[in-house]
Image (cartoon, rainbow, N blue to C red):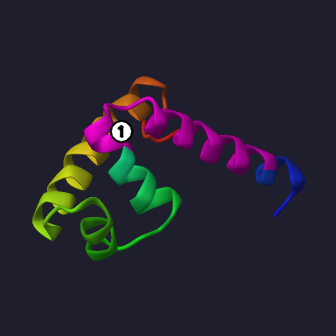
Amino acid sequence: MPSGEKAESQSGYLRLVELIRAMPEQYRRILELKFVEEQTSREIARRLGLSVAAVEKRVSRGRGLLMEKLKEEGYGDGG
């Protein structure tokens, strides 16, 4: 990967982490564990004392909120 693409990829990852950290707490922690720490829904449920179904529902809703924010910033418009 050329260094410019690598820097852009790193910048995009850091922006994604910033957006996750700015989310409401009920989604923020779960998305951090799921996408930043790469834990499974079962691991997250055990860690936070929730059911796997609750974790998956929050991941789904949080991902939707995150996608809306990314679209507002111009990601996901095909360009």
- Answer above or below: position of 53 versus 19: below
Tell me which residue sits at (44%, 39%) in the image.
20
Tell me which residue sits at (17%, 61%) in the image.
50
Q: Which residues are magenta?
A: 7-28
Tag 1's secondary structure?
helix
Tell me which residue sits at (88%, 53%) in the image.
3
* Residue ranking furthest to the top: 72
> In the rendered image, which quarter contains the N terminus?
bottom right
User: How many marks do you count on the picture?
Assistant: 1
Q: Residues within 10 Å of mark 1 (few under 14, many from 20)?
A: many
Choose between 46 and 6: the one closer to the eye. 46
Quarter of image, res 57? bottom left
- Answer above or below: position of 14 versus 49: above
Residue 75 in sight in this render? no
Does the segment drawn in magenta span residue 53?
Answer: no
Picture coordinates of residue 33, whole percent (x, y): 42, 59
Residue 31 in sight in this render? yes
Q: Which residue is mark 1?
A: 66
Picture coordinates of residue 69, whole percent (x, y): 38, 29
Tell me which residue sits at (48%, 28%) in the image.
74
Q: Tell me if 41 is positioned left or right of 69 in this view.
A: left
Does the segment drawn in magenta span residue 8?
Answer: yes
Picture coordinates of residue 14, whole percent (x, y): 64, 42
Quarter of image, res 45? bottom left
Q: Tell me if 62 is positioned left or right of 1 in this view.
A: left
Q: Which amino acid does the dot numbered 1 rest on? A: Leu
* Residue ranking furthest to the right: 3
Choose between 44 and 77: the one closer to the eye. 44
- Answer above or below: position of 61 versus 73: below
Q: Main secondary structure of the magenta part?
A: helix
